[in-house]
């Protein structure tokens, strides 16, 4: 798992590329990036699955913010990003949410 950040000079946003590697994804056929930035909507489009089994997605996030997120594998299993910037307790479960700071 990894987070790659690219700050834009032309506007106050950061392009963040989320990558879930095949080992963490296990045998998942699909992965969705769900978090504060999409109102925790589990009906979002799945991440792109690469030939090596990794999943990736790039989104633009407003700078100077923190966003909680998790990966939803096969619409049933939640997974954290263990290379996230931070972790916060989830308000709806006993687990933590991953946090990206931009």
Image (cartoon, rainbow, N blue to C red):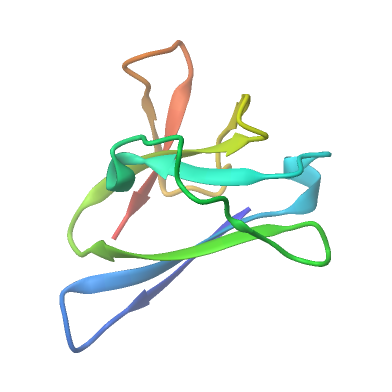
Residue 78: percent from left, percent from top:
58, 28
Apparent side of residue 72 relative to residue 28 in the rendered image (left or right): left
Total tally of numbered discs in the picture: 0
* Residue drawn at the location 16% of the way across and 74% of the way down: 12
Query: Residue 55's x, y, as percent?
Result: 66, 57
Where 99 falls versus 92 (above or below)? below
* Image position of 4 with respect to 41: above or below: below
Q: Position of residue 100 (x, y in %)?
A: 37, 50
Q: Is residue 78 left or right of residue 67?
A: right
Q: Identify the residue shown where x is 76% and y is 44%.
A: 29
Q: Is residue 23 above or below residue 15?
A: above
Q: Is residue 59 left or right of residue 19?
A: left
- Toward the bottom, the furthest residue is 10
Quarter location, residue 31: top right
Q: Is 101 displayed left or right of 10 in the figure?
A: right
**Quadrant that contains the C terminus:** bottom left
Q: Residue at x 37, y 21 (%)?
A: 90
Tell me the residue at 57%/50% (across/down): 46
Please identify the quarter of the rendering in which residue 93 is found: top left
Residue 81 vs 61, above or below: the answer is above
Which residue is situated farthest in the top direction here?
94
Residue 69 versus residue 28: which sits nearer the camera?
28
């Amino acid at each position: 798992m990894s987070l790659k950040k690219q700050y834009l000079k032309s506007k106050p946003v950061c392009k963040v590329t989320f990558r879930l590697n095949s080992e963490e994804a296990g045998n998942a056929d699909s992965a969705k990036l769900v978090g504060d930035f999409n109102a925790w909507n589990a009906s979002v489009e799945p991440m792109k699955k690469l030939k090596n089994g990794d999943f990736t997605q790039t989104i633009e996030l407003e700078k100077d913010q923190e966003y909680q997120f998790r990966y939803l594998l096969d619409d049933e299993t939640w997974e954290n990003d263990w290379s996230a910037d931070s972790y916060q307790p989830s308000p709806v479960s006993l687990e933590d949410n991953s946090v990206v700071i931009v």
